[in-house]
Amino acid sequence: MSHADAAEKLEDWCRHYNDDRPHSAISYNVPSALHFPDGVTSPPS
């Protein structure tokens, strides 16, 4: 396993954890929905 491979796997896991996986502690929402309720993750251009 290379450093680049580990970094890619960690990024995939973080994306899944924050954007796809519902959490029971926050009413089965995903964490990113709390920070970006409209689904917008970047400022308008």
Image (spheres, grey):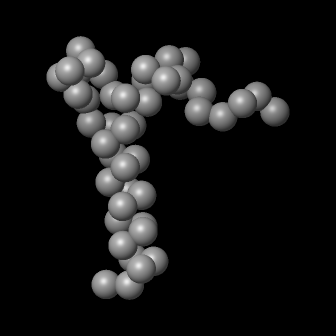
**In the image, residue 20 above or below residue 25:** below
* Residue with the most extreme bottom position: 2
- Determine whether, in the image, residue 43 is placed left or right of residue 21: right
- Determine whether, in the image, residue 40 is placed left or right of residue 10: right
The location of residue 23, given as percent across then percent down, is: 23, 28
- Determine whether, in the image, residue 41 is placed left or right of residue 19: right
**Count of numbered marks:** 0
**In the image, residue 36 above or below residue 19:** above
Q: Residue at x 27, y 36 (%)?
A: 21
Q: Quadrant of residue 18?
A: top left
Q: Residue at x 33, y 46 (%)?
A: 16
The location of residue 36, given as percent across then percent down, is: 52, 23
* Residue with the most extreme left position: 24
Q: Quadrant of residue 11?
A: bottom left
Q: Quadrant of residue 34?
A: top left
Q: Residue at x 49, y 24 (%)?
A: 35
Placement of the N terminus among the 4 image quadrants: bottom left
* Residue with the most extreme right position: 45
Q: Residue at x 50, y 17 (%)?
A: 37
Placement of the C terminus among the 4 image quadrants: top right
The location of residue 6, given as percent across then percent down, is: 36, 73
**In the image, residue 2 above or below residue 13:** below
- Determine whether, in the image, residue 15 is placed left or right of residue 17: right
The location of residue 9, given as percent across then percent down, is: 35, 65
